[in-house]
Image (tube, grey):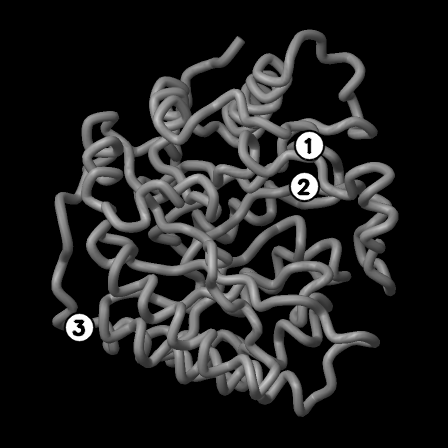
């Protein structure tokens, strides 16, 4: 075992020990194994494919109909973005009932809800960021039985973060993670292009500055690649700290890039791609998840269709038909390329 692997194995063991004695909340839905090798992989999606698309101004799916649609496609859970759960912020158990009745799991919700500060760097904003996230965990995620909390960390500083800013961000994550783990919720920062943790060196620096008892990792295959990183190697190196995998692809030309594609480029045509775009080595990623027996969620985080996307013009019909086509493509990619036992989708 390499030095890095040994170090992160010890850190992961310590983090797991930190969760001992945490009470279970709500009813746990048992899901049938879908992966042919590792029965502890769970498969779901974020709500971005129907809620956060550039194409969609008024989503053809409501929260309620989306839950039914995802269950019907054989996926096992949903991670929502803010506006998808806003109507349930003060009644989480009503939302949980919808999931229980559909036989799928509410995985967690991304941060960035209405009124919530997401600035992890500015000293003047940090106290409210911590307060808002603790309240959201206590009042919403904990009653829903979530065991992790995927968080973005605000806007990227002009010119990229300084080392002092990364240290301050890491300290904020440590302080917040100490509070959330006491509720049984693993704080899971999500490296994201155009955010303060974008490039591979920044991701590694923050993970090495944070305490593995309190801070985990939501590894997004597309963002790690677009930030110039080797997604397979990062997932392997920090394997004991993984809380969740986001499945997103990009174009092969972005592999090993020295500069991240800009937001202006993304406005013209998405730098993201449905699975199979050639940017991410999904075979390599699943080999790690299978060989090292990852236990947890592996979920699509695919934006909905938008003008300028590769293949967009080949899809006919209205917004709902285009979204359904994207969903079918990605489910069938898991089936045909990776052997996941999901039902075929026409």
How far apart marks 3 and 2 lie (CA) works out to 35 Å
Q: Nearer the viewer, residue 115 or 69?
A: 115
**Residue 275 shows in the view:** no
How far apart marks 1 and 2 lie (CA) works out to 7 Å
Locate residue 20: give its quadrant: bottom left
Mark 1 / mark 3, whichever is N-terminal: 3
- Image marks 1 and 2: residues in contact by CB distance under 8 Å: yes
Locate residue 223: give its quadrant: bottom right
Mark 1 / mark 2, whichever is N-terminal: 2
Residue with the mark numbered 2: 249
Residue with the mark numbered 1: 276
Residue at x 66%, y 32% (from the top left corner): 274
Residue with the mark numbered 3: 20
Residue 222 horizontal/vertical position (percent): 66, 49
Residue at x 61%, y 23% (from the top left corner): 326
The label on residue 300 is none
Q: Nearer the viewer, residue 54 or 75?
A: 54
Q: Is residue 89 above or below residue 159?
A: above
Residue 112 horizontal/vertical position (percent): 50, 57
Q: Is residue 142 left or right of residue 82?
A: left
| Label 1 neighbour load within 10 Å: few <14, some 14-19, many 20+ | some
Q: Is residue 286 above or below residue 22?
A: above
Residue at x 26%, y 38% (from the top left corner): 95
Residue 273 horizontal/vertical position (percent): 71, 36
Q: Is residue 190 left or right of residue 202?
A: left
């Amino acid at each position: 075992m390499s030095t890095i692997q040994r170090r992160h194995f010890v850190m992961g063991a310590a983090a797991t020990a930190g969760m001992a004695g945490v009470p279970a909340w709500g009813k746990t839905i048992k899901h049938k194994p879908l992966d042919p090798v590792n029965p502890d992989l769970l498969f779901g999606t974020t709500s971005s494919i129907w809620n956060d698309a550039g194409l969609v101004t008024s989503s053809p799916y409501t929260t309620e109909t989306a839950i039914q649609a995802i269950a019907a496609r054989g996926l096992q859970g949903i991670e929502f973005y803010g506006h998808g759960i806003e109507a349930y912020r003060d009644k989480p158990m009503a939302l949980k009932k919808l999931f229980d009745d559909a036989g799928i799991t509410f995985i967690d919700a991304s941060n960035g809800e209405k009124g919530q500060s997401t600035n992890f760097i500015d000293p003047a904003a940090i106290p409210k960021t911590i307060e808002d996230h603790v309240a959201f965990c206590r009042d919403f995620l904990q009653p829903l039985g979530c065991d992790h909390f995927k968080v973005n960390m605000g806007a990227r500083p002009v010119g990229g973060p300084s080392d002092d800013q990364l240290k301050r961000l890491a300290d904020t994550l440590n302080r917040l993670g100490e509070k959330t783990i006491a509720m049984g919720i693993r704080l899971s920062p999500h490296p994201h292009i155009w955010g303060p943790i974008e490039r591979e060196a920044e991701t590694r620096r923050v993970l090495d500055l944070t305490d593995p008892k309190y801070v985990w990792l939501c590894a997004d295959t597309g963002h790690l690649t677009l930030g110039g990183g080797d997604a397979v190697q990062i997932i392997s190196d920090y394997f004991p700290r993984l809380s969740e995998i986001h499945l997103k692809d990009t174009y092969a030309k972005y592999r090993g890039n020295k500069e991240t594609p800009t937001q202006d480029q993304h406005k013209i045509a998405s730098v993201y791609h449905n699975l199979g775009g050639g940017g991410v080595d999904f075979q390599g990623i699943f080999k790690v998840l299978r060989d090292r027996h990852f236990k947890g969620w592996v979920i699509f985080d695919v934006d909905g269709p938008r003008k300028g996307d590769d293949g967009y013009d080949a899809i006919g019909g209205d917004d709902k038909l285009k979204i359904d086509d994207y969903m079918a493509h990605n489910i069938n990619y898991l089936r045909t390329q990776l052997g996941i036992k999901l039902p075929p989708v026409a």
